[in-house]
């Protein structure tokens, strides 16, 4: 069963929460982070993307960058921008985007659970990305990046969280510049804390990483490298846990640089072996499994995978698998989408217009829109011990860095 713990969060003062809150470190590159944080010394990007405060020629993975992050988080604390919670608490985090809300519980999740597969995974991790977070955590002594976990709904947990929201004031309540609304409640009463801990340990057999595989893997490796007796906080890592009913996975689309030497007509002809293909008068946003949109040569087409083009096991039935096996690999010779520079990925939050833009600019030759993976599919794959193809899921809205940080050295 799942083991979670309250923790003493490092968090901003109420009046500065909006200024501190920052997009996750991995959704902005260094240049974008410099722009986002300019004229805002309180932005947590100075901690998570600390290279923005150094010369642009500095290697972003150098120790100098991690030392700067440590310095910046200490400055924010010393200047009263950040405070430390007096007692271990749970936190309730509500996000509202385009009128749709989702609420999760912020807690420490057990590294033992991660290592013992109580926390289920569905993606491979890359060593260089793990090492970056390992260095950041070890140098700063802080887990600044939130791991997004999901679990199957438990009515008693849902009821407890909703009742707390109704009967207590939020400590943070603000709309970010992108119009996403953030509210956080502090659960600081001993009875409620005990109830939450017990409900998870009794009612939640597994949690599932929705987003943050590298952050979770890094936290586990940091714990392994430390003397457990002196760093008990490292036995847990920063997570926000959402019941499945609260979540919506968005599409994660593909663009390719070339057609592997084929003309557009030759490419379309090859597609007809495994797909029914029809011209579309407007952009194609798939509305069902095994439907795809294709934008090539200034035109949209609707593709539907034929019976026999896929298997019905948890991995084979995924549309990202069908596209990879029957198009990217078989026709375009893109064998490994994690490393092949001829393919790129576009989150559904950017819209179909972004796909058209990438192709019309000449940067890419074709774009594919996909139907989103479902939460059930994610659970089924993780339960089967398999992993999804890379870039299969895109979750919105994103949790903000800086609002709740987990310290492992104090």
Image: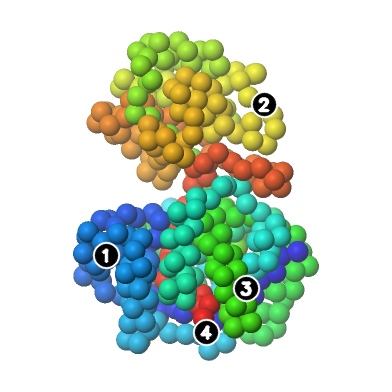
Residue appearing at x 62%, y 43% in the figure: 387
In the depicted view, which residue is nearer to us: 230 or 392? 230
Counting residues from the N terminus, which is met first, the one under dot 4 or under dot 2?
2
Please say if the residues under marks 1 and 2 sit with CB atoms less than 8 Å apart. no
Side of 119 relative to 216 (left or right): right
Residue picked out by circle 2: 311
Please say if the residues under marks 1 and 3 sit with CB atoms less than 8 Å apart. no
Q: CA distance from mark 4 to mark 3?
A: 13 Å
Q: CA distance from mark 1 to mark 3?
A: 31 Å
Residue picked out by circle 1: 52
Percent across and percent down for residue 53 are: 25, 69
Counting residues from the N terminus, which is met first, the one under dot 1 or under dot 3?
1
Are there few (<14), some (14-19), or many (20+) residues within 10 Å of tag 4?
Answer: few
Residue picked out by circle 3: 235
Name the image quarter holding the N terminus.
bottom right
Does dot 3 land on a helix, a strand or a loop? helix
Q: CA distance from mark 4 to mark 2?
A: 51 Å
Percent across and percent down for residue 274 are: 56, 16
Are there few (<14), some (14-19), or many (20+) residues within 10 Å of tag 1?
Answer: many
Does dot 1 land on a helix, a strand or a loop? helix
Residue picked out by circle 4: 410
Label disc, if present, on residue 329 of the rendered structure: none
Q: In the rendered image, is residue 352 in sight? A: no
Would you identify the image quadrant in which residue 76 lies?
Answer: bottom left
Counting residues from the N terminus, which is met first, the one under dot 2 or under dot 3?
3
Counting residues from the N terminus, which is met first, the one under dot 1 or under dot 4?
1
Residue appearing at x 37%, y 43% in the figure: 350
In the depicted view, which residue is nearer to us: 268 or 125? 125
Counting residues from the N terminus, which is met first, the one under dot 4 or under dot 3?
3
Q: Residue furthest right?
A: 202
């Amino acid at each position: 069963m799942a083991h979670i713990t309250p923790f003493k969060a490092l968090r901003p003062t109420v009046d500065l929460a909006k200024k501190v809150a920052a997009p996750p470190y991995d959704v902005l590159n260094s240049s974008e982070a410099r722009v986002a944080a300019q004229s805002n010394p309180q932005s947590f990007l100075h901690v998570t993307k600390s290279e923005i405060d150094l010369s642009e020629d500095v290697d972003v993975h150098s120790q100098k960058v991690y030392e700067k992050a440590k310095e910046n988080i200490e400055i924010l604390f010393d200047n009263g921008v950040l405070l430390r919670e007096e007692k271990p608490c749970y936190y309730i985090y509500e996000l509202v985007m385009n009128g749709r809300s989702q609420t999760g519980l912020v807690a420490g999740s057990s590294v033992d659970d991660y290592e013992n597969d109580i926390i289920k995974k569905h993606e491979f991790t890359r060593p260089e990305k793990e090492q970056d977070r390992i260095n950041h955590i070890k140098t700063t002594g802080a887990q600044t990046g939130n791991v997004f976990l999901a679990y199957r709904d438990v009515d008693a947990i849902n009821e407890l969280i909703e009742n707390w929201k109704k009967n207590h004031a939020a400590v943070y309540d603000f709309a970010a510049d992108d119009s996403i609304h953030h509210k956080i409640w502090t659960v600081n009463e001993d009875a409620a804390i005990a109830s939450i801990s017990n409900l998870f340990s009794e009612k939640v057999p597994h949690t599932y990483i929705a987003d943050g595989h590298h952050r979770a893997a890094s936290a586990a490796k940091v714990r392994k490298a430390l003397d457990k007796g002196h760093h008990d906080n490292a036995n847990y890592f920063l997570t926000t846990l959402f019941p499945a009913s609260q979540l919506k996975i968005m599409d994660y689309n593909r663009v390719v640089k070339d057609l592997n030497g084929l003309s557009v007509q030759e490419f379309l002809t090859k597609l007809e072996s495994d797909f029914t293909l029809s011209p579309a008068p407007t952009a194609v946003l798939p509305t069902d499994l095994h439907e795809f949109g294709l934008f090539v040569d200034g035109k949209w087409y609707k593709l539907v995978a034929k019976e026999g083009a896929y298997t019905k096991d948890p991995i084979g039935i995924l549309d990202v698998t069908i596209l990879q096996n029957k198009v990217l690999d078989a026709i375009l010779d893109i064998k490994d989408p994690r490393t092949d520079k001829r393919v790129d990925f576009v989150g559904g939050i950017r819209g179909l217009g972004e796909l058209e833009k990438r192709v019309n600019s000449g940067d890419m030759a074709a774009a594919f829109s996909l139907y989103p993976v479902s939460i059930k599919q994610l659970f089924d794959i993780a339960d089967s011990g398999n992993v999804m193809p890379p870039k299969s899921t895109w979750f919105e809205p994103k949790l903000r860095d800086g609002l709740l940080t987990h310290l492992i050295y104090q």
